[in-house]
Image (cartoon, rainbow, N blue to C red):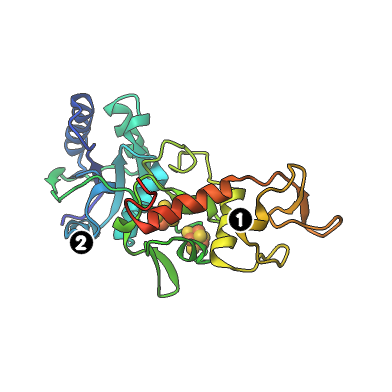
Amino acid sequence: MAEGPTVIVSRQRGAEPQRRAIEDTLLSRCTSAGYHAVTVPHLYHIAHRSPMWDEIAAIRGPVALVTWMHPRPAEWTLRSHAPGLAIVAAVDLARCEDAEAAFEAIRDAVAPSDHPGSLRELSADVTARWYPVIDRERCTSCGHCLQFCLFGVYERADGEVVVARPDLCKDGCPACSRICPQGAIIFPLSDDPQIAGAPGTLMQPDAAARRMYYVRTGRQCPKCGRRPEAGELTGLPANALVCEACGSPLAEGEASAKASPVHDEIDDLIDALDRLAAGPGSDGS
Ligand code: SF4
Ligand code: SF4
């Protein structure tokens, strides 16, 4: 693999001609300016164990990543497979006015070399996928997602929590992104900008989902010291005094208490995930 500034272009998934034309114009602009250009299928959909990841990981020198995704999830999707890459820019084509604007964003981040550019097209199997991407700059490896997920998507490796079995994740389920205390879990294809890791947004832990975490894992809430159970978190009056972290009912004047409505959605969330865990037909349908 050639050294020097490389532009990796992650192709759109599907065959929208306008987007394809933008990609091709950008590739031509980059190669004639002296960049090494590499095209890959849509990064997020490439198989977890694809040999193509090794080819990408072998790229040396600064890398500008161009995708149709928000920059943060795009970068962490790539880093999860090729942690040693020197990614200096992540450009979201959807936010560029045209190919020239994308080219300028690349050139602002890394100058082309004096040598002739090149184009290499890498291919790999892709299927529609849905799984979490971890922002390692935010993740503290606390393990909450690992304890919470019923499907074995996460595991701990060398002390770090990693997405080990992404294809066990349930389509459309973003539940663990709602309980991560660091806002580190991203689902790049979510319609919700926070969950999808849109620029300027950060997923805030969702109070109801955090309560579900304590109920499910039986862990002690570090804020109030209780181990809440599902039954005691529902049916409380809207102005009940509850722990803001786990939703346990608190006595008047207890430390770390905050008046907050407790939602029946805790039970709904637990039921929904239990049904998913039990498999098709478990809802009686
Ligand atoms: S819950 Fe968030 S911070 Fe904790 S291990 Fe999972 S991703 Fe990392
Ligand atoms: S979204 Fe649901 S199934 Fe997927 S990793 Fe998170 S908790 Fe597990």
Q: Is residue 209 left or right of residue 18?
A: right
Can the viewer see residue 156 in this picture?
A: yes
Point out residue 173 in the picture as x, y percentages from the top left corner.
41, 48
Quadrant assignment for ligand 2: bottom left
Q: Nearer the viewer, residue 114 or 97?
A: 97
Seen at 34% across and 52% down, the residue is 77
> Residue at coordinates 34% horizontally, 47% vertically from top-left?
171
- The residue under label 2 is which amino acid type? Asp
Q: Which mark is residue 191?
A: none
The first of marks 1 and 2 along the sequence is 2
Depth order, front residue of 79/158:
158
- Please, which residue is most extreme toward the bottom here? 158
Residue that label 2 marks: 54
* Distance between the alpha carbons at the discs numbered 1 and 2: 40 Å
Residue 122 pos. (x, y %)? 14, 49
**Residue 134, visible in the rendered structure:** no
Quadrant of the snapshot with the C terminus? top left
**Residue 41: % across, % down:** 20, 44
Quick check: 249 above or below 143? above
Say what amino acid the circle numbered 1 marks.
Arg
Q: Which residue extends farthest front? A: 284
Give the residue number, with chain letter if any, for mark 1: 211
- For this orientation, the residue located farthest to the right is 253
Quarter holding residue 135: bottom left
